[in-house]
Image (spheres, grey):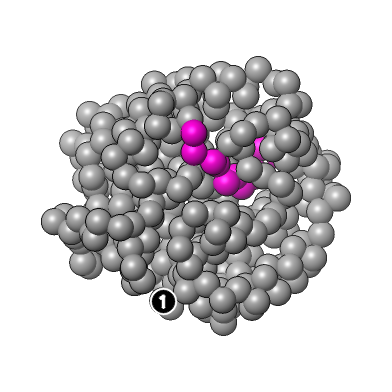
Amino acid sequence: MTHNRRQVIAGASVMAMGRTLEAYAGPASSRSIIIVGDWGRDSAPYQRDVARQMDSVAGKMDCAGVISVGDNFYEDGVQSVDDVKWRTSFEDIYCGPNLKSLPWFVALGNHDYGGVPQAQVDYTQHSDRWCMPARYFKIGSSQLGVPDTDLFVIDTNALIAENFEGNGRMAVNLRSQDASAQLAWLERELASSGARHKLVAGHHPIFSGGSLHGDTPDLIRTLLPMFKEHGVSAYLAGHDHDLQHIISDGLHCICAGAGCEARPVRMVNGTQFCASSPGFGILTKASDRLELQFRDDLGKILYRSLLS
C-alpha cells in the first residue's frame, strides 16, 4: 500500500539514533554512488519524484553510477528485451541530463522473477547504461569508478529455500539456479578482493524493521558469517519499501527500497535510522571513509552518517 506523503511525514515516520552528520560536507575529492530499489512502476508519481532528485544529486555530486537493489519492474518483471516496461519504467523515467549518462549495476528482485529474469541480463547488450552481465557478478573498483571499493551483486532470490517450493513462476524460473555455486563464488571473490571497502548488493535484507518483510533467516544463516569473515563494509538491499540503516556485528545493513512508495517501518536491534518515506541512498567515498546519506522524494537530506 502506498502512503500519502502528508501522513508519512506528519506521523512518527523518521527515527534515528547514533551519530548523524548534518554539517559534514566531506573533502573536495570524493566519489558517490546512488542506491535505489523497488522502483519500476510505470511512471508512478513517487517514482518520477525520486528519479528527479536522483538526477539533481548526479548533477551536484561526482557520481560513479547507480546501484539498483531489485524489483526493477512491477508487478511481474519484463518478458523480453523489447518489453514496453523498459521504456515506461526505466528509459523514460531516469532520463534527466545528469542521470542518463550513469551506469546502473542491477540486482534481481522477487517481482523480477515473475517475468523472464534472463531478459534483464540480456538487456545489458542493448543498453549503454544497464549492467547485469549475469544474475550475480562482481564490479571491480576500476569499473565501478570508486577508489579501493569492490561491488558484488548477488541474486538473493536463489538463496531463499522457500522460493524453490511449488510450481509458481518464481520456482520455475529458479530451477536453473544453483545456490551453492553462487555462495561458493561469492566466498572466493570476497576472499580474493584486496579492496578496503567491499560492498555487497542484493534484493532481500539480512536485517530489517520493515512492516511487510523484516529479517531474512536464510541470509542471516548463509551470508552474515561470510560477510564478517571477509570484512564486508556494507550490505545494500531493498524489498522492504523504506529507508533503513542497521548495524549488526560491525556490518552496515542499508535498505533503500523506497524508489516509488513507502510502507511503515520500526526500529529493531541495531537500527541507527529508519524512515517511511519515498527516497534513495547515496554512498560517498572520500579518502578512506564511506559516508551514507538518505534523501527523500523532495530532495531533503533525511540522514547522514559515517560508516568508516
| Range shown magenta | 101-114
Q: Quadrant of residue 153?
A: bottom right
Q: Position of residue 51 (x, y in %)?
A: 40, 30
- Magenta stretch: includes residue 112: yes
Q: Residue at x 43, y 33 (%)?
A: 99
Q: Is residue 158 magenta?
A: no
Along the line of sight, which residue is nearer the eye, 288 or 111? 288
Residue ID at (57%, 54%): 143
Residue 265 visible to the viewer: no
Q: Quadrant of residue 264?
A: top left
Q: Inspect this view and state whether residue 83 appears.
A: yes
Rendered location of residue 103, percent (x, y):
54, 41
The quarter in which the N terminus is drawn is top left
Front residue of 72/143: it is 143
Q: Which residue is mark 1?
A: 250
Element at label 1: loop
Viewer-closest of 61 and 82: 61
Q: Amino acid at mark 1?
A: Gly
How would you rate the neighbour count of disc 1 (Cα within 10 Å): few for under 14, some for 14-19, many for 20 or more?
some
Rendering coords of residue 18 (x, y %): 22, 67
